């Protein structure tokens, strides 16, 4: 049972993110998305900072001397989440989730191609490159489906659709860069709790400034609305971030990536219950091609890496 704990936590995280996208896509029709960002990441920062202070103060002390990396993490994270939630106000949640997720491996491949050391991208074999090409083609096809008016969101305008697609793409590339910088900090001895405690500071400041400028605090008119939104933020954003951090540490990268590749499929299924959406076969086909390509590329990588891992583990002859 203990061996299943990690994969189960990653699965719970994936399902919760599907609920998050569908739920907040509806919330953003009446509440400024920066209000949600401010509330969510204030709570997340407070929680992880508390955990780091109680359990791993050494991790916070290890942040000294890494100011440039921390600034880079904050800038990339703020750009990623701002673009992601803004894209949800313009596109189907399943489209946003798929493009955001798909830009991750494509960004790492592109960074490796241009020799950017941050990516530390291993050389892909021919089979893997084929599946990466399938991922890119599925995202390109999804752009065409959306711009040609065959996506699921009703009454969407062309300019909003194009902006949403661009925002989702930027969010996926930015969160990938952010995670790579986070990994650099963790490789240098900074704990995951400490990294999470400092990575949202710029996002909180930006969201706070946007909410003040837009005077959108009034979007939450009653204590009941505030309580409901706070519960949703904790259940769908704050706690899943923690569960994912725990789960990913107990799960092989292959298993974790395969489980997460199913996320867009879950989102598509859930958004069918949203009255603003209509069923779209072309969107579903693109999502399925994407998910299959991601699963296949990870399996190919696992098969390629397994002999190397066995060789390293075998005793010297």
Image (cartoon, helix red, strand yellow):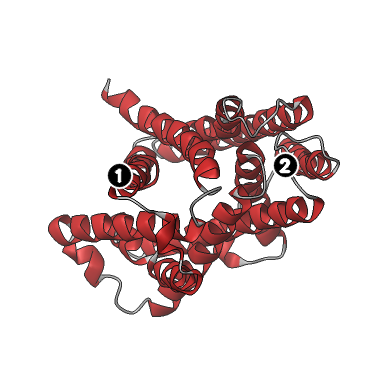
Q: Is residue 38 above or below residue 223?
A: below
| In front: label 2 or label 1 | 1
Distance (Cα) linking label 2 and label 1: 46 Å
Q: Earlier in the sequence, mark 2 or mark 1?
A: 2
Give 297 or 263, whichever is nearer the viewer: 263
> Where is residue 315 shown, x and y percent of the image?
39, 36
Choose top left, top right, bottom left or bottom right for residue 136: top right
Give 2 or 311, whichever is nearer the viewer: 2
> Where is residue 50 shown, x and y percent of the image?
19, 58
Location of mark 2 (residue): 132
Secondary structure beneath label 2: helix
Q: Is residue 284 above or below residue 184?
A: above
**Crowding at mark 1 (Cα within 10 Å: few <14, some 14-19, many 20+):** few
Residue sitting at x 50%, y 69%: 214
Horizontal side of residue 4 vs 297, given as left or right? left
Choose top left, top right, bottom left or bottom right for residue 130: top right
Quadrant (top left/top right/bottom left/bottom right) for the N terminus: top left
| Residue 224 disc label | 1
> Where is residue 228 shown, x and y percent of the image?
33, 42
């Amino acid at each position: 049972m203990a061996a299943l704990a990690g994969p189960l936590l990653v699965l719970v995280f994936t399902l919760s993110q599907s609920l998050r996208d569908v739920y907040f896509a509806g919330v953003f029709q009446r509440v400024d998305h920066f209000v949600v960002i401010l509330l969510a990441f204030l709570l997340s920062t407070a929680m992880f900072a508390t955990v780091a202070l109680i359990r791993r103060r050494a991790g916070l002390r290890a942040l000294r001397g890494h100011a440039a990396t921390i600034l880079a993490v904050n800038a990339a994270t703020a750009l990623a989440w701002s673009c992601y939630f803004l894209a949800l106000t313009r596109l189907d949640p399943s489209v946003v989730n798929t493009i955001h997720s798909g830009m991750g491996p494509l960004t790492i491949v592109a960074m490796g191609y241009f020799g950017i050391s941050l990516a530390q991208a291993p050389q892909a074999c021919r089979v893997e490159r084929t599946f990466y090409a399938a991922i890119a083609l599925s995202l390109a096809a999804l752009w065409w489906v959306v711009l040609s008016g065959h996506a699921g969101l009703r009454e969407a305008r062309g300019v909003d659709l194009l902006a949403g697609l661009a925002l989702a793409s930027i969010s996926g590339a930015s969160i990938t860069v952010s995670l790579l910088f986070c990994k650099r900090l963790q490789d240098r001895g900074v704990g995951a709790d400490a990294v999470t405690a400092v990575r949202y500071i710029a996002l909180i400041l930006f969201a706070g400034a946007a909410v003040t400028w837009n005077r959108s605090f009034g979007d939450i008119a009653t204590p009941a609305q505030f309580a409901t939104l706070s519960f949703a933020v904790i259940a769908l954003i704050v706690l899943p971030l923690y569960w994912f951090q725990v789960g990913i540490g107990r799960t092989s990268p292959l298993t974790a990536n395969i489980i997460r590749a199913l996320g867009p499929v879950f989102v598509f299924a859930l958004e069918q219950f949203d009255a603003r959406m209509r069923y779209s076969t072309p969107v579903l086909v693109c999502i399925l091609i994407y998910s299959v390509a991601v699963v296949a590329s990870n399996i190919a990588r696992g098969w390629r890496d397994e002999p190397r891992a066995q060789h390293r583990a075998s005793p010297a002859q």
